[in-house]
Image (cartoon, helix red, strand yellow):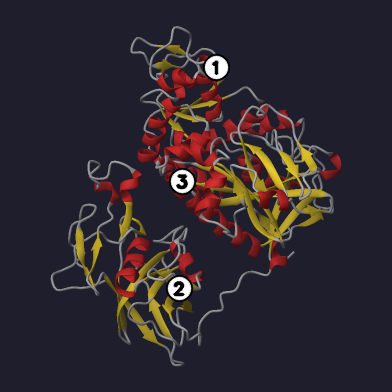
Amino acid sequence: MTSDTTASVATFGTLLGMALGGVPVYSSDYDSVDETEFPNRHAYRSYVDGVYMGHKWQCVEFARRWLYLNKGYVFDDVAMAYDIFQLNSVRVIADERRLPLKSFLNGSLRHPEVGALLIWSEGGEFEITGHVAVVSEVYPDRLRIVEQNVGHKVWPEGQNYSRELHARISEDGGYWLECSFGDASILGWVIQTDDDQYSEVIEPEDPQLFELALRHVSGKGQSLRASWLNVANPEEEAYVAMMGGHKLATLPEDEHKYMVMSQAAERVLKRATNELHALFMHATNYVLQNEALLTHFNIPPSIWPKIHQSWDNRRNQMITGRFDFSMSSRGIKVYEYNCDSASCYMEAGLVQEKWAKHHGCHDGKSSATKLVRNLIDAWKNSKVDGVLHIMQDTDLEENYHALFMKRAIEKAGIHCKIIKGVKGLAWDKDGDVVDPEGEKIRWVWKTWAWETALDQIRAECDDDEQRLRDYQTDVPRDHAPRLVDVLLRQGVMVYEPLWTLIPSNKAILPVLWQLFPNHPYLLNASFDLTETLQKNGYVSKPIAGRCGFNISLFDGSQALVEETEGRFAHQDQIYQELWKLPNVEGYNAQVCTFSVAGHFAGSCVRVDPTLVITKDSDLMALRVADRI
């Protein structure tokens, strides 16, 4: 690196220098943000001429802004910087034309050139996201780049680049770059060109690689012991109590069966999870800027300001979420995003691996090997600085789910206590809610759904619109504290944040389709039953439903294919394109991926004889193998 390492870190938004083409480079030291200048998340969105560039002042924002100001085109939205390497075109803003992009691996015989985008792989200094910079000067022994979100230091006087990287031309003419950070790896460079000589062939994966395979363990590696979960651990003891034994499947004939997916499928699921999280966040922001859309979510207007506040202040404080997918050779389609009280974490992150060890299943690897580690890291990076209360219902499934999360939280160095139900909660003299031992509740992780708290408001107001609009959430009540009195109390910080009500609500699905029509991972969805949906078949879903309740499936002739009962029949409905789960040897299989802090953290598969996965559907062990 040739930048001045003795210079101090510049505050957020400070001009670090001017890149070629007269494009400013800014500091993205988020620890020094002036909150009066950036009071909410919307303030961080960067636009030039009304064109969205990205999040201030990240690496992707600068790369897109540089291309727009110097070339007149931009690349499409990406979830991670390294995804730019997979793009095959850019969009000309003036006339919407598409121009080809070509990607070249580090060491390519086609050397980088001024204006090329240099791409780093995921890992090391650029863990999870990768990185992108713009090439400004190219020499046989070195290469200069301009970038944001690295260093945060003002450039020395007379310097017009961020960093200088060591380069070497090999005997065969390949151009090799070494990263300044020893633990980071340069993937290659991307150039807007028609010439594909030496470029990587970016082709979609073979659809057959997305098929799941059902397999059986032989039983030869199985221990003679019937017990294989450690009941000395509270979460495993609670799981055994709920399941009625040491087992992963409820049916004895399924206990020796498991599913396998290919490594290629896992790669695409990872990309889909990260990209869809970004799309759902974009749609959430869009809804919160449009009150007419927000009315579709059936949330009491008195709560809207709190949701806005939660989104503005706690956009990056989501810990857990789960996407539900259909995955087969037909493609990968997302049904919904459960980012408010998502379940199945323990089954995926712990139980299925212990099942594999007990039964001697060495086929590939577990599909969620890093899930627990990711949870611990996410909690370490959280803002919790006191006792965290885990609030759960008395449901048996919630027992082990809460205890599983408690272990991850404690490994992150956070003291926590579990509260079952709300009995024993009280008001103290300051009007705060305290637990049965008299400790103030300030931090909460919950297994309850936010909708449960909102239902308490609706019941108290008798669904009267004006009373719902005027409802006061922070006023101590005459009765003992209820769930809503804790979760919506001023000064109580809840995980998952209140804003997760928006992306978890099925009303987000038509918004996504409106914003990203024909996106390969999305299904057509609408607030109204359109002619297209009727023609092709559709699913009717309650906007705030859970557990697969009150879902109806209709084919293209309007015939009812299947429906489930439940407690959400009173909810407004949305309509989503019918896309049946793949049937794998008699099992309708739904692949679920877990997001931790907004990033892919593993997967699992749930199976059912019906087309709708419910809370009673089994989780079958999922393995990732080279091939299926």
Q: Is residue 207 left or right of residue 117?
A: right
Question: Does the residue at mark 1 contact the one at mark 3 (Cβ under 8 Å)?
Answer: no
Q: Which mark is residue 46?
A: none
The residue that mark 3 highlights is: 377
Comes first in the chain, label 1 or label 3: 3
Residues at marks 2 and 3, CA–CA distance in whole angstroms: 43 Å
Q: Residues within 10 Å of mark 3 (few under 14, many from 20)?
A: some
Mark nearer the viewer, 2 or 1: 2
Question: Please, what is the three-letter code of the amino acid marked with disc 3?
Answer: Asp
Quadrant position of residue 550: top right
Residues at marks 1 and 3, CA–CA distance in whole angstroms: 39 Å
Can the viewer see residue 43?
Answer: yes
Question: Does the residue at mark 2 contact the one at mark 3 (Cβ under 8 Å)?
Answer: no
Q: Is residue 534 left or right of residue 428?
A: right
The residue most toward the front is 531
Point 27% across, 47% down: residue? 31
Q: Residues within 10 Å of mark 2 (few under 14, many from 20)?
A: few
Provide residue 158's location: percent of width, then percent of height. Answer: 14, 73
**Where 244 falls versus 474 (above or below)?**
below
Point 37% across, 85% down: residue? 168
Q: Is residue 440 left or right of residue 436?
A: left
Question: Please, what is the three-letter code of the amino acid marked with disc 2?
Answer: Arg
Residues at marks 2 and 1, CA–CA distance in whole angstroms: 54 Å
Comes first in the chain, label 2 or label 1: 2
The residue that mark 1 highlights is: 459
Point 62% across, 28% down: residue? 399
The residue that mark 2 highlights is: 97
